[in-house]
Image: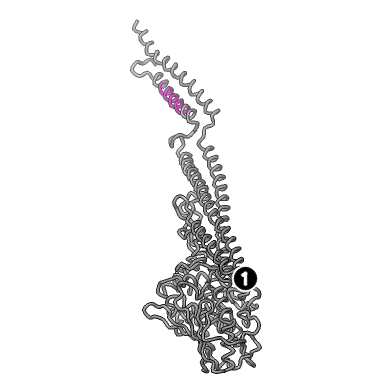
């Protein structure tokens, strides 16, 4: 059909030309970009998958960068902690040197000056920063404990340093010792009761079937033999020999002796207290809790020894007077009840009662009561602390005897009574408070030993919210390591006795620092694994995205060439089609 108005051949050719032009443009874009999908119009579903993968790829790259930065931070922290560990090694070496009596007090004073410089450097190490952030000065976490003994030292040290009211101080000490696991006393009691109901005494780390008497240190002050319920402090020879004057200064405590009125038993007890018992008890308590009468913050350094004779079940007791407005102790006395000790076996250096099967060892009783005395002299508002804290702390020093074992078993079987003893401690019977206090403090130290420090550091190592590694860096300053008190008192080696105590303190500090060093090292290993995993994921996701989006260039060039040829062909055909209308003019000739 020959028509003029509508040249359908030309229209068809034009349509083909437009298609080929669009196809050429598409192929040209693929060739120039190297991608077969350049917009959602190319393949909507594939484009959506590809874009999500691209987001993931960029996220993986950012996470990988985070692991590298985190690793750099850990290297800075590790360097500072390693330096502290090296200093503590040298510190212990000097403390051992000072403990040797080949040194004079002048020599020890020189060593003390060197140790003071060591402590200053440890504090300088703790102020190391990364990108302006302090790492090991307590900002990124607070407490860390090396073992159960270290945990109870942390607990006592916190109470010792605290100026808060009794309940607030106790809550804070529990939170601090447990590394935030228990926010306060109530949380501790609730968890303790629940675990005892489910696991029994195992929840406290107590095994009554063996010879473990539960003394938290595990060794006597000589560091040689395991303590038993009978032998609490090591005696050398006959402690009952000699007779003290009116007063004696023992480890910073002035002990005022009473008139024995020529009573043989009283004189023997006074001599034993003067010769060994008080010294050894205070050494043991210092080792156990880092409490002594030589601290700057000690409120009283004098104690009267008294005797009584009463059939009231009390073997001995410490009485403390205190300022009701400040809660600070200002007077101490130790009273021994001669009703139970008027027939001492003077051949037994532990203060056993002749002919008695009750094993009422006086040195054990003195260790218990002197724990109260030292806590009272160092802990503000000591009198307002729960009874179970006072008695439990004393029990931890010397361990438990067979009587206490049976009481603990009974309390573990009756958790309702156990809870009532803890929550209503002021009205609880003495034996119940002893057992409950011992159990819950063992539980606290057992939990603290397995706890991590506060996790104030978060390393984002994933592409999702909160997909992070959390950790804490403990406080590595001297005060946290136990080398210094909040009142400025530092570990001292100026006497042979103090040097021996310093060795124990430095050992605890080393254990804490090494534990933190191990934690940081383990974190570096984990970050390296995380980085390797992120790198592999980045590679695989990139490869998957490439399959979806990248163009096969050989195929793209083939398609481009085809589209280019077809475009030229369609252009020629359109030109030919436009000539069809000219054929109509031939009819007019």
283 or 402, nearer to the observer: 283
Residue 88 appears anywhere in the view: yes
301 or 220, nearer to the observer: 301
By secondary structure, the bulk of the magenta-drawn segment is best described as: helix
Residue 202 appears anywhere in the view: no
Quadrant, the C terminus: top left
Q: Which residue is mark 1?
A: 101
- Residue 157 at what x, y percent from top left? 49, 70
SS type, badge 1? loop
| Residue at 50%, 36% in the rendered image | 549
Which class describes the residues within 10 Å of circle 1: few (<14), some (14-19), or many (20+)?
few
Q: How is the image coloured?
A: one colour
Q: Residue furthest top?
A: 589
Quadrant, the N terminus: top left
* Residue 406 lies in quadrant: bottom right
Q: Is residue 238 above or below residue 537?
A: below
Q: Which residues are magenta?
A: 14-27
Q: Reply yes or no: does residue 220 show up in magenta.
A: no
- Residue 427 at what x, y percent from top left? 45, 85
Q: Is residue 443 above or below residue 403?
A: above
């Amino acid at each position: 059909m020959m028509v003029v108005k509508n040249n359908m051949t030309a229209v068809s050719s034009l349509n083909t030309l437009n298609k080929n032009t669009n196809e050429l443009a598409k192929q040209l874009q693929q060739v120039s970009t190297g991608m077969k999908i350049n917009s959602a119009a190319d393949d909507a579903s594939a484009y959506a998958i590809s874009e999500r993968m691209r987001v993931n790829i960029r996220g993986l790259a950012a996470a990988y960068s985070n692991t590298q930065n985190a690793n750099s931070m850990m290297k800075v922290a590790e360097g500072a902690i390693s330096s502290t560990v090296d200093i503590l090694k040298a510190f212990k070496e000097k403390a051992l040197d000072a403990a040797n009596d080949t040194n004079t007090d002048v020599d020890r004073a020189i060593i003390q000056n060197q140790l003071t410089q060591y402590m200053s450097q440890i504090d300088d190490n703790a102020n190391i920063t990364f990108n302006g952030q302090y790492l090991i000065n307590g900002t990124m976490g607070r407490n860390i404990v090396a073992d159960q003994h270290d945990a109870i030292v942390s607990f006592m040290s916190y109470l010792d340093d605290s100026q808060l009211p009794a309940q607030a101080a106790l809550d804070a000490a529990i939170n601090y010792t447990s590394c935030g696991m228990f926010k306060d006393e109530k949380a501790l009691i609730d968890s303790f009761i629940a675990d005892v109901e489910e696991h029994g005494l195992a929840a406290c780390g107590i095994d009554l079937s063996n010879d473990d008497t539960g003394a938290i240190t595990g060794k006597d002050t000589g560091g040689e033999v395991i303590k038993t319920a009978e032998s609490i402090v090591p005696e050398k020879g006959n402690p009952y020999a000699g007779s003290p004057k009116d007063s004696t200064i023992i480890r910073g405590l002035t002990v005022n002796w009473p008139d024995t009125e020529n009573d043989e038993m009283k004189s023997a007890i006074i001599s034993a207290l003067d010769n060994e018992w008080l010294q050894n008890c205070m050494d043991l308590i210092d080792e156990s809790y880092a409490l002594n009468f030589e601290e700057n913050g000690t409120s009283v350094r004098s104690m009267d020894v008294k005797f009584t004779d009463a059939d009231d079940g009390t073997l001995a007791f410490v009485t403390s007077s205190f300022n009701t407005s400040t809660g600070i102790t200002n007077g101490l006395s130790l009273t021994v009840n001669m009703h139970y000790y008027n027939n001492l076996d003077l051949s037994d250096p532990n203060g056993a009662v002749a002919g008695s099967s009750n094993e009422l060892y006086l040195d054990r009783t003195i260790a218990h009561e002197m724990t109260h005395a030292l806590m009272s002299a160092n802990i503000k508002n000591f009198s307002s602390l729960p009874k179970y804290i006072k008695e439990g702390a004393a029990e931890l020093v010397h361990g438990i005897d067979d009587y206490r074992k049976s009481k603990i078993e009974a309390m573990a079987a009756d958790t309702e009574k156990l809870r009532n003893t803890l929550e209503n401690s002021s009205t609880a019977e003495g034996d119940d408070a002893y057992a409950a206090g011992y159990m819950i403090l063992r539980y606290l130290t057992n939990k603290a030993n397995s706890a991590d420090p506060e996790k104030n550091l978060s390393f984002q190592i994933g592409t999702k919210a909160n997909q992070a590694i959390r950790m804490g860096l403990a406080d590595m300053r001297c005060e946290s390591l136990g080398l210094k008190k909040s009142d400025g008192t530092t570990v001292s080696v100026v006497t042979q006795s103090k040097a021996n105590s310093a060795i124990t303190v430095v050992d605890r500090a080393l254990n804490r620092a090494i534990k933190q060093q191990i934690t940081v090292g383990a974190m570096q290993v984990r970050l390296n694994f995380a980085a390797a995993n992120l790198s592999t994921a980045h590679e695989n996701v990139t490869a998957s995205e490439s399959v979806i989006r990248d163009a096969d260039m050989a195929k793209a060039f083939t398609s481009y060439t085809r589209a280019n040829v077809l475009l030229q062909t369609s252009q020629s055909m359109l030109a030919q089609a436009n000539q069809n209308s000219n054929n109509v003019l031939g009819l007019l000739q």
